[in-house]
Amino acid sequence: MTDAESRAADEQRAADAELPSAERLKAFTDAVVAIAMTLLILPLMDSVTDATESSAGAWVAAEWPSLLTFMLSFVLIANFWLTHHRMFARVTHVDQGLLWLTIVWMFTIVWLPVATAITSTFDPDPIEKLLYVGSLILTSLVLTLTRVYLIRHPELHHESQDKFRDGLAVGVIITVLFGVALLLMFAIPALNYWWLFVLFLTRPIYAIVVRTRDRRTQPRA
């Protein structure tokens, strides 16, 4: 090992010693997400308790919009958590910037059960859609900003920059598609939250982005 490499290793060890471990933050984040996913079911539990229908079938017929938004929110929060989990898999340390980005992200996750309950409590209107889909946009945006932060602070993790950049492209696509879904809800309200299925375009769009990038980086003959 050269003197320069030895000094760099010493500086890295000193930086690691000053920065707190990411393990407690990861555990706390997992707990917050688990609580948020559990809170999603509470309005349905109250609906069952207060039900006036004479059969389970009648209850399902009356509550199917609430059931739909519950399942949708559960799947979306689960996907947000999976993305966060993969992003932090090789994050070893936390600084103030990363800590506060994660706290903001947890706030958006905890808010989602409230936004979900709003969709089934009040009559459909633009504010309801803005509160729900806007919350999803914010959650996705904070994840994207967190990935940008990690790209700029390699001392916090052992992940490759290329992997973070690939994830950043996917995050930007998802955030934009949430925005597109919200605009389509305003433009063609009849389909309402079914417009969120535009998120299935994420992979095809990402494939196009990768092909375009590869063509640009290929050396010309």
Image (cartoon, rainbow, N blue to C red):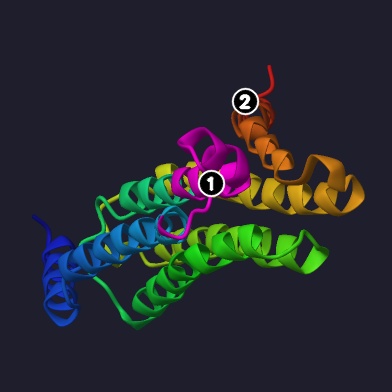
Residue 84 among those drawn in magenta: no
Q: Mark 1: which amino acid?
A: Glu
Mark toward the viewer: 1 or 2: 1
The residue carrying mark 1 is 53
Q: How many marks?
A: 2
Quarter-wise, where is residue 12 in the image? bottom left
Mark closer to the chain start, 1 or 2: 1
Q: Is residue 194 left or right of residue 105?
A: right
Kindly state the secondary structure of the residue where label 2 is placed. loop
> Dominant secondary structure of the magenta stretch?
helix
- Compared with residue 202, is residue 25 higher up or lower down, i.e. above or below? below
Q: Which mark is residue 218?
A: 2
Q: Residue 1 lies in what quarter of the image? A: bottom left
Q: Residue placed at 33% from the left, 46% from the top?
A: 86
Q: Is residue 169 visible?
A: no
Residue placed most toward the observer, 159 or 178:
178
Q: Residue furthest right?
A: 187
